[in-house]
Image: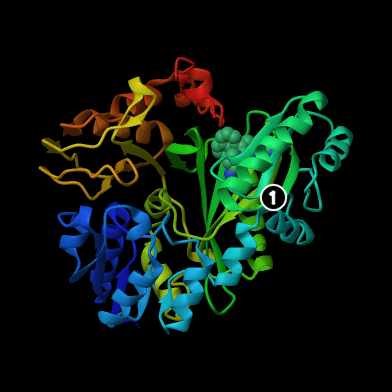
Amino acid sequence: MFQKILIANRGEIAVRIIRACREMGIKTVAVYSEADKEALHTQLADEAICIGPAPSTESYLNMERILSATIAAKADAIHPGFGFLSENSKFVEMCQKCNITFIGPSADMINRMGNKSEARRTMRSAGVPVVPGTKEPVYEAEEGKKIADEMGYPVMIKASSGGGGKGMRICEKEELFCENFRTAQMESVRAFGDHTMYIEKYIVHPRHIEFQILADKFGNVIQLGERDCSIQRHHQKLIEESPSSSLTPQLRKEMGKMAVHAAKAAGYENAGTVEFLLDQDDHFYFIEMNTRIQVEHPVTEMVSGIDLIKEQIMIAAGYPISKKQEEIHLNGHAIECRINAEDPKRNFMPCPGVIEGLHLPGGFGVRIDTAVYGGYEIPPFYDSMIAKVIVHDKDRISAINKMRSTLGELILEGVVTNLDFQYEILNNEDFQRGKISTDFIPEHFPSDSLNRD
Ligand code: MV4
């Protein structure tokens, strides 16, 4: 087992990983930027090493400095968390060269899943349903238009290197195709230096359903149920829950089996997520595979009782997954609300500042993952997410009520947050009925000027 792990991240996920390591008897090394001297992760770890100035390009994204810190501290492994270097295959290769274990999949796997048209091909040849669309990458607008004309509109034009909605365009009709294609492609070249595109049939009012999987070095692959992440704004998830109110037990079983099959077909290792779109007729389609632990992982932990971070560490150290599929029992309902330091009244503009008053709720089935404390100053350089409120109860209605009660008790003074916005969603009748899709926010909050991409 590892003696010492360096956590190449900050905020609540760094704290989450430090806690898991401590429980496992593994020493921890935090890395921090000059802006994070007083951060919780810096204070909680056994050791902390400053890796550079505030901008993440000079600190949390600086591979050489993070590797130097790992070597100096004599750590055996690096946990990347999410974001930053978590899906950077070059970093994974550098770790390997330095004889440091990267807690995650191989560089090759990250590349193969990061290339969305290649992932589509892998899944299609394995018999996993993918959204109807192109079988080969597309580079020219005219070439794409021929295929789209045959497919019928609307279509979705996507960048192979895309993610988070970048390099993606809906095209409603033939006349607009070439213009939309070129715009999406230019965006992709700018953002990823890649002009590889693919085209899919546009799925109307889809639900975003993702399955959590675990895969070890012995070929064992299990799934821990789904998360419904349909409540998003500008590709930023706001609320995640498990189980999804959109799945019947039969469909859940089918999709879960397919998620395991997808991970096996890819030869996947460590924790991962298989993302599907579910259409209005309950057909599901693979869209992407995430090769990291995700922000919303606690939702799965609450219903499964499995500590996903510990499993990741054990898998990377060469141990088998702690449980077989038959031993996984999903209980009750969990919901997560992301609390961001941003102002819904000002187009969700980030609002960093000092936390002047803080009260974190608690109680049975309440979990708060955060790295803020009273008097803490949120630096303006990073993500605006400051807390994840997760609740667990026997069913969806009870969980929604528990979340409303919990958010009502939460006090965050000194900074503007999206707390009231979250409260409004929870109080929405359609949300309560489970009438949700990825269009929920634009449809229910049209004032949200907010809803243009
Ligand atoms: C789609 C789609 C509809 N049809 N693909 C957005 C991010 C990227 N990961 C995939 N996305 C979508 N792909 C087809 N063929 C709708 C979305 C989409 C979406 C997906 C999941 C969660 C939120 C979303 C919000 C807007 C659009």
Q: Is residue 349 left or right of residue 87?
A: left
Residue 387 location, x and y as percent?
Answer: 28, 43
- The yes-or-no answer for disc 1 within 8 Å of ligand 1 is no
- Scheme of colours in the image: rainbow
Q: Which residue appears at 80% of the width and 29% of the height?
A: 153
**Residue 449 x/y as whole percent:** 46, 19
Q: Residue at x 52, y 40 (%)?
A: 244
Across the whole image, how many numbered discs are drawn on residues?
A: 1
User: In which quadrant of the rendered view does residue 60 lie?
Assistant: bottom left
> Camera-side residue: 289 or 168?
168
Q: Is residue 26 visible?
A: yes
Q: Which of the image's four quarters has the C terminus? A: top right
Quarter of the render that holds ligand 1: top right
**Residue 279 visible (yes or no):** no
Q: Is residue 26 above or below residue 249?
A: below
- Mark 1 secondary-structure assignment: loop
The amino acid on which the numbered mark 1 sits, given as a three-letter code, is His
Above or below residue 324? Residue 183 is above
Q: Position of residue 40 (x, y in %)?
A: 18, 55
Name the quarter where the N terminus is drawn. Answer: bottom left
- Residues 87 and 22: in front is 87
Horizontally, residue 399 falls left or right of residue 179, namely left
Choose between 98 and 29: the one closer to the eye.
98
Q: Where does the image place residue 155, in percent across and percent down from the top left?
A: 75, 33
Q: Going 11% across and 35% down the picture, which residue do you hit? A: 356
Q: Which residue is mark 1?
A: 195
Q: Callout 1: few (<14), some (14-19), or many (20+) C-alpha neighbours within 10 Å?
A: many
